[in-house]
Image (cartoon, rainbow, N blue to C red):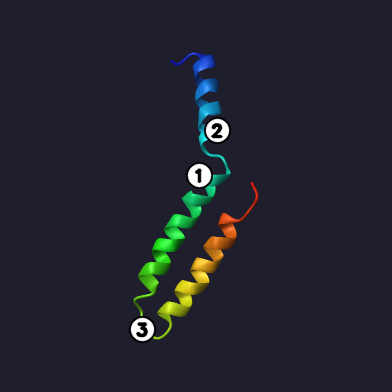
Amino acid sequence: MMPKLARVAGLFLLLLFLNACVLTKVVTVPMRLGGAVVSIVPVVGNTAHDVIDESAEQIDNIPL
């Protein structure tokens, strides 16, 4: 079993790592990849990609 201090330190480091920049990137990178895949679809692909990209941009701008 891990000592209590090691658990608290590990939790603190995890929370420090998951600050705003990393947290928003975890959300937006899969969105952008999905938008890139959708852009292959004829006619509506580019429009859907633009909407997804704009949404990801707004999430990146959230002040956390």
If you read the primary sequence from the N terminus, does the residue marked by circle 1 or circle 2 appear first? 2
Secondary structure category for the residue under label 3? loop
In front here: 8 or 47?
47
Report the residue marked by disc 3. Answer: 42
Report the residue marked by disc 1. Answer: 22
Q: Residue at x 44, y 56 (%)?
A: 29
Q: Amino acid at mark 2?
A: Leu
* Vertical position of residue 55 compared to residue 13: above or below: below
* Vertical position of residue 7 compared to residue 40: above or below: above
As measured in the structure, the alpha-carbon distance from the residue carrying label 3 to the one carrying label 2 is: 43 Å
Quarter of the image where the N terminus is located: top left
If you read the primary sequence from the N terminus, does the residue marked by circle 3 or circle 1 appear first? 1
* Vertical position of residue 28 compared to residue 17: above or below: below
Q: Residue at x 49, y 13 (%)?
A: 3
Report the residue marked by disc 2. Answer: 16
If you read the primary sequence from the N terminus, does the residue marked by circle 3 or circle 2 appear first? 2
- Measured from the top left, where is residue 28 in percent x and y? 49, 56
Secondary structure category for the residue under label 1? helix
Marking on residue 5: none
